[in-house]
Image (spheres, rainbow, N blue to C red):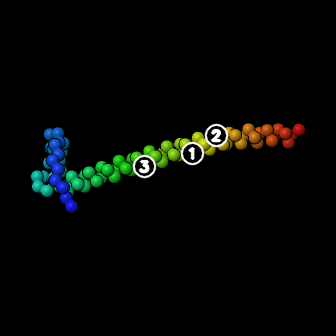
Amino acid sequence: MHRQIEVTLPEETLQLLEGVMPKGDRNAFINEAVKFYIAEKNKANLRDQLKEGAIRRAQRDLAIAEEWFDIEEEARQNSEK
């Protein structure tokens, strides 16, 4: 199913479009461009989410390591007595 919409573009953008796709069937080009843009935005969003998750896990792991370091240090000192 296709729906027709009206799109208004700045002159500069229209000139860029005309340089790549001469007048004619621009529908397929614009369709692919929109899909590509959305896919790239989704990838960037996923990348950001993965980065945030990695940072949270690293902070959690560091806190655990610091906790265990203190416990191990205390155990080592007690074993030396």
Structural distance between the alpha carbons of marks 3 and 2: 26 Å
Q: Which residue is mark 1?
A: 57
Residue at point 49%, 43% (across, down): 52
Instruction: Tell me the quadrant of the picture where the C terminus can be found.
Output: top right
63 relative to 37 in the view: left or right: right
Horizontal side of 70 relative to 2 (left or right) equals: right
Image quadrant holding the N terminus, namely bottom left
Please give the residue where the numbered disc 3 appears in the rendered image: 46
Amino acid type assigned to the residue bearing label 2 in the image: Ala
Q: Earlier in the sequence, mark 1 or mark 2?
A: 1
Q: Residues within 10 Å of mark 1 (few under 14, many from 20)?
A: few
Residue assigned mark 2 = 63
| Viewer can see residue 19 | no
Estimate the x, y position of residue 66 in percent, counting from the top left.
68, 39
Indicate the amino acid at tag 3.
Answer: Leu
At mark 2, the secondary structure is: helix
Q: Are marks 3 and 1 in contact (CB under 8 Å)?
A: no
